Image (spheres, helix red, strand yellow):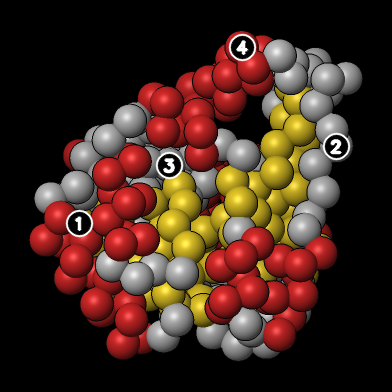
Amino acid sequence: MTVTVRVPAKVNVQLAVGGARPDGFHDLANVFLAVGLYDEITVTEADALTITCEGPDAAQVPLDATNLAARAALALGARHGREPRVHIHIAKDIPVAGGMAGGSADGAGALLACDALWGTGASREELLDICAELGSDVPFSLVGGAALGRGRGEILTPLPVGGTFHWVFAVADGGLSTPAVYAECDRLRIASGTGATSADVPDPEPSPALLEALRTGDPLALAASVSNDLQAAAVSLRPSLTATLSAGTEAGALAAMVSGSGPTTAFLVQDAESAEKVAVALSASGTCRAVRVTSGPVPGATVL
């Protein structure tokens, strides 16, 4: 038997970061929006747990037990007394190490695919619990749509969205380590005198204006309220992102921001026609490796 699951990328329209916690994580107010770039995870019965990968930057994807897809199969198998004897094939289209939750998507996709393949009958709550064990962004990859993530991002509240938002993504050369970006965020806060611990940094809260912009589907209002507390850290580690952000803004994007921990940059635009115009300008700018046009919100992990 074979099961294939399609899982979307995400963009953080707000990423408010609190101070460092004793466990090394940071409390977040993380407003996720799932967008129509997808990985497809195909799980097939096999003699042993193996992983293969194809697509852009597939060579950067680990094919061992550190891969979140493998960890998902192991975690579900452990809970239900199953040896994870499966071949997991990842067809990648989400940028690797690009701040769009590609690895998290693979984990959520493999989890849902193994659940369907094995007929474990796991509840939605159990699947989300396993997702939270795997990583902070994995629960949202399962759920999709739009949601507010609390805690380290894994405690989700679905959010209403009143329309479709159009995006252009500029893919940078190479990736950025998420832990390195958070560490740089802490370093910059200490250097600026604002501190980095939970006692020094205000509790992160979602923007009421941003939540209202999502609810009404107003791209202009959303553009005025998007924010990413990790952007300064990502740009500090990858100064070339400044030129990419400027190129998109000059081409007419309503808002330009680093996606998550980067280095992919995200440009909110008015409509599909504007998206094509910004995409052409970014491609011609020479400031990025590839350009992708899409929209959201879209559903989360789905069995095909």
Q: Between disc 3 and disc 1, whose residue precedes?
A: 3
Picture quadrant of residue 230: top right
- In percent of width and height, residue 193 lies at 71, 14
Q: Describe the element under mark 1 as helix, strand or loop.
A: strand
Q: Residue at x 70, y 27 (%)?
A: 25
Pointer 4 local density, CA inside 10 Å: few below 14, some 14–19, many at least 20 = few
- In percent of width and height, residue 295 lies at 44, 77
For marks 2 and 4, give the CA distance.
Answer: 20 Å
Residue named by callout 3 = 262
Nearest to viewer (mark 2 / mark 1):
2
Residue named by callout 4 = 191
Given residues 110 and 201, the one toward you in this image is 201
Residue named by callout 2 = 203
Left or right of 275? Residue 110 is: right
Q: Amino acid type of disc 1? A: Ala
For marks 2 and 1, give the CA distance.
Answer: 36 Å
Q: Are marks 3 and 4 in contact (CB under 8 Å)?
A: no
Pointer 3 local density, CA inside 10 Å: few below 14, some 14–19, many at least 20 = many
Picture quadrant of residue 51: top left
Q: Amino acid type of disc 3? A: Gly
Nearest to viewer (mark 3 / mark 4):
4
Q: Between disc 2 and disc 1, whose residue precedes?
A: 2
- In percent of width and height, residue 73 lies at 53, 47
For marks 3 and 1, give the CA distance.
Answer: 14 Å
Pointer 2 local density, CA inside 10 Å: few below 14, some 14–19, many at least 20 = some
Left or right of 279? Residue 150 is: right
